[in-house]
Amino acid sequence: DSGVTQTPKHLITATGQRVTLRCSPRSGDLSVYWYQQSLDQGLQFLIQYYNGEERAKGNILERFSAQQFPDLHSELNLSSLELGDSALYFCASSVQSIAGGYNEQFFGPGTRLTVL
Amino acid sequence: QQQVKQSPQSLIVQKGGISIINCAYENTAFDYFPWYQQFPGKGPALLIAIRPDVSEKKEGRFTISFNKSAKQFSLHIMDSQPGDSATYFCAAGGSARQLTFGSGTQLTVLP
């Protein structure tokens, strides 16, 4: 158990809908990362938050947005869902500081999103 | 270019054998190279990581070999065990601290 929790575990929805995925980082971790894992694209970095502020953006679609709240939990919002958005969405956390070196990213168990 | 290329896509090894997975990168700004192990239904977990100032790092049965001039790094699993059967991802990180992952290698160790 990595200490990172994600809810829900599974989500089935229809095209055009909007969903919210939730992540609680490990205690003490200030950085949260979101990744998308699909069969054809592999594991892709979406976005990073550090202590409530957006720190880095990867291949995140404009239909997707995220935020990190004062209690450090994070939410990933996916809207106008398309069939191709079906994937595993992982959250990871680390103690990453702004200017420090690398720290291990601990991954949650993921949320499996199925868009029908 | 942020790409990390990983091979092979799948690997079958006999118990006790050596598993070797290779990765190549293009961006010379990368300065952190971790390997992650993922079991079905689980998130990836860090296995071992290396910085470009060393050419090899060993932790138990797992070794990373790093060739800075060739921009390549590899994972060697010695005395492979059935419990090592999983998907392995190499990754590379740069100044932005985000990771770029390889496409993954599905390792099967036969008993």
Image: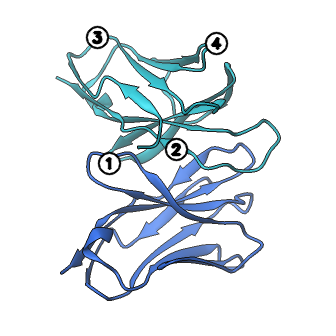
Chain colours: A cyan, B blue
Instruction: Tell me which chain the residue with mark 3 is part of.
Output: A
Taking the view exactly as shown, the residue that stands out farthest to the right is A99
Q: Position of residue A65 (x, y in %)?
A: 51, 18
Instruction: Tell me which chain the residue with mark 1 is part of.
Output: A
Query: As displayed, is residue A57 above or below residue A13?
Result: below
Query: As displayed, is residue A97 above or below residue B59?
Result: above
Q: Residues within 10 Å of mark 1 (few under 14, many from 20)?
A: few
Work out whether disc 3 and disc 4 sit on a shared chain: yes
Q: Secondary structure at mark 2?
A: strand
User: Is residue A44 left or right of A81 when viewed as pictured?
Assistant: right
Which is more N-terminal, label 1 or label 3? Answer: 3
Q: Nearer the viewer, residue B91 or A110?
A: A110
Which is more N-terminal, label 2 or label 1? Answer: 1
Query: As displayed, is residue A100 above or below residue B102?
Result: above
CA–CA distance between discs 1 and 2?
23 Å
The residue to which callout 1 is attached is A40
Amino acid residing under circle 4: Pro
Taking the view exactly as shown, the residue that stands out farthest to the bottom is B17
The residue to which callout 3 is attached is A17
Q: Which mark is residue A106?
A: 2
Amino acid residing under circle 1: Asp
Q: Quadrant of the C terminus of chain B?
A: bottom left
Q: Position of residue B109 (x, y in %)?
A: 25, 77
CA–CA distance between discs 3 and 4?
27 Å
State which mark lies toward you, 4 or 1: 4
Q: Nearer the viewer, residue B24 or A104?
A: A104
Which is more N-terminal, label 1 or label 4? Answer: 1
The residue to which callout 4 is attached is A70
